[in-house]
Image: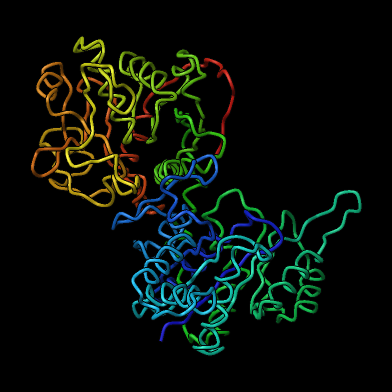
């Protein structure tokens, strides 16, 4: 039967439960086990689709079109397993389902309560994802002590009671802070966190200690003693400069070995040779490239998580060092773009920053700077080309303008924004794209038909396709029925390619997204100038 691992967090949020869960999945898969990851999110939103990126970070889209927590991106990138909508469960989705059943009379007049009705639905969602895999790793979002995660913890406790101690284990990620004035590492927060978890009927089998410095054996011994966890099950997780180094560090700490022993998996040590070889590419860096991301969600770096990771994958495989430059679409100078090897305009929604993006694309197009547009980036590129090349001066999108007579970007024919469920009005999930022979896009993908993930409402208006094509815009990727524009590009440009889909969601460290790889390849050939950046918001890899 499937073995279940629940990952909880204590003391503070943002400790890296997602990376821990992803790394554990990586290690167990390297032991030739089948693995699936899952995230339980305690917020009331049904999904993150309508949540502000400043609060939640990016929305990750699965193959089957679910809009999910960004941790699912980590799971996929670390394990290579393409997850589905049942891999992300929210409190909102649980309560909606229970209330729907209550309205239909499915509970036969019973008083609907958190226990057993809510917890039973949570257990159903947890059990429903396993599909006979060897190990399921379920991360419980939030922090132990948060009132909103109590039903998830109770459901997990019941699952252990139902399936037995030998088939269910709990991994608790916690913090060991360093107090500067006293120069001491403190285990008391971990002790309190574990004590609170026990008050809910759950005793952790393994503790992962997040730290910004070496803990030493004395600290581990103390945690083992006061938290009643075997010393071999106390794992040190120091801060690392590269998240892809975490699986190897966790292996060295014995994380997978402890799990193997606790669940009696009886597997061989993991084969990490390919992963280590991949990470060894960092030792032979050839050059540095400066890539700008021009957008509007920079209050939280996680807003463009998959875009950044896809860039990193491509740079790693080409032995390049990435100097990432954040450019606010409402607050930058055009001259700053000349200091870059390439510019990405990622997806997004809303009018803010649109004119800044369009102005940047004009500069990029005229000054031959490598450009990669994604979703909204493609739409802005079409608007810019229509205005400045095809002389359609009021070209715009119906998302941003109701007065323009020339809406070169418009709603899909079957979209209805009057629906009560706004998220349901989007085109989500994996769709095919037929690529034009002889195009740059064909040289990127090689295949005649590709499949990529989408998340959008608006499309290129077919009424303007002939006019745009006559002006020189190449529609290099279309839906198989030729009705929807999927990719555009320009001739006589070092690299000017944009897609309606999101290639970043399928990028992996060992297999970068083709569009990102080719973009980085083109960017590495560009010699940039030394124009100082206005805000100097850079992130070095």
Residue displayed at 51% across by 29% down: 325
As drawn, 277 above or below 452: below
Q: Nearer the viewer, residue 190 or 400?
A: 400
Q: Is residue 214 left or right of residue 539?
A: right
Give the total number of marks visible in the rendering. 0
Residue displayed at 21% across by 35% down: 487
Quadrant in which the C terminus appears: top right
Quadrant in which the N terminus appears: bottom left
Q: Where residue 141 appears, x then y in whole percent?
A: 56, 61
Residue displayed at 27% across by 30% down: 497
Residue at the far right: name it. 182
Q: Is residue 392 left or right of residue 249?
A: left
Q: Nearer the viewer, residue 458 or 453?
A: 458
**Colouring convention used in this rendered image of the protein:** rainbow
As drawn, 472 above or below 56: above
Q: Where residue 215 appears, x then y in whole percent?
A: 77, 63
Q: Where residue 174 appears, x then y in whole percent?
A: 69, 64
Q: Where residue 131 appears, x then y in whole percent?
A: 34, 77
Q: Is residue 292 left or right of residue 165?
A: left
Residue displayed at 46% across by 31% down: 289
Q: Nearer the viewer, residue 235 or 173?
A: 173
């Amino acid at each position: 039967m499937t073995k279940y691992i629940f990952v909880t967090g204590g003391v503070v949020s943002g400790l890296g439960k997602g990376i821990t869960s992803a790394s554990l999945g990586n290690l167990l898969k390297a032991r030739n086990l089948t693995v699936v990851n899952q995230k339980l999110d305690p917020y009331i939103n049904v999904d993150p689709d309508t949540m502000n990126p400043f609060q939640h970070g990016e929305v990750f889209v699965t193959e089957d079109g679910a809009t999910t927590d960004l941790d699912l991106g980590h799971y996929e990138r670390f394990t290579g397993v393409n997850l589905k909508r049942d891999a992300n469960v929210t409190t909102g989705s649980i309560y909606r389902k229970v209330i729907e059943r209550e309205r239909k009379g499915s509970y036969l007049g019973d008083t609907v309560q958190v226990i057993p009705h809510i917890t039973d639905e949570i257990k159903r969602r947890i059990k429903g994802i396993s599909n006979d895999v060897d190990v399921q790793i379920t991360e419980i979002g939030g922090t132990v002590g948060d009132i909103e995660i109590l039903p998830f913890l109770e459901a997990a406790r019941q699952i252990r009671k139902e399936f037995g101690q030998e088939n269910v284990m709990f991994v608790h990620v916690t913090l060991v802070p360093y107090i500067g004035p006293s120069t001491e590492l403190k285990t008391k927060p971990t002790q309190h966190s574990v004590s609170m978890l026990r008050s809910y009927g759950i005793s952790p089998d393994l503790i992962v200690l997040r730290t910004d410095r070496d803990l030493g054996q004395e600290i581990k011994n103390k945690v083992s003693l006061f938290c009643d966890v075997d010393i071999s099950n106390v794992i040190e997780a120091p801060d690392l400069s590269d998240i892809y180094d975490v699986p190897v560090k966790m292996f060295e700490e014995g994380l997978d070995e402890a799990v193997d022993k606790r669940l009696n998996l009886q597997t061989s040590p993991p084969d990490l040779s390919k992963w280590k070889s991949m990470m060894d590419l960092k030792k032979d860096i050839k050059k540095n490239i400066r890539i700008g991301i021009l957008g509007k969600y920079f209050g939280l770096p996680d807003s463009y998580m998959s875009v950044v990771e896809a860039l990193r994958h491509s740079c790693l495989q080409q032995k390049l060092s990435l100097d990432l430059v954040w450019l606010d679409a409402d607050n930058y100078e055009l001259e700053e773009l000349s200091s870059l090897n390439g510019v990405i305009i990622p997806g997004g929604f809303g009018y803010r920053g649109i004119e800044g993006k369009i102005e940047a694309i004009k500069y990029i197009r005229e000054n031959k700077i490598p450009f990669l547009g994604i979703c909204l980036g493609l739409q802005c590129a079409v608007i810019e080309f229509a205005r400045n090349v095809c002389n359609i001066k009021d070209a715009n999108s119906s998302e941003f303008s109701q007065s323009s007579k020339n809406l070169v970007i418009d709603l899909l024919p079957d979209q209805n924004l009057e629906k009560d469920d706004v998220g349901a009005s989007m085109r989500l999930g994996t769709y095919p794209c037929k690529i034009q022979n002889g195009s740059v896009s064909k040289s990127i993908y090689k295949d005649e038909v590709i499949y990529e993930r989408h998340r959008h409402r608006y499309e290129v208006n077919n009424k303007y396709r002939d006019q745009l094509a006559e002006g020189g815009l190449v529609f290099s990727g279309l839906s198989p029925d030729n009705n929807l524009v999927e990719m555009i590009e320009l001739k006589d440009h070092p690299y000017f390619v944009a897609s309606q889909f999101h290639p970043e969601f399928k990028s992996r460290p060992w297999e970068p997204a083709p569009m990102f790889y080719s973009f980085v390849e083109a960017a590495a050939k560009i010699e940039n100038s030394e124009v100082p950046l206005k805000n100097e918001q850079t992130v070095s890899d």
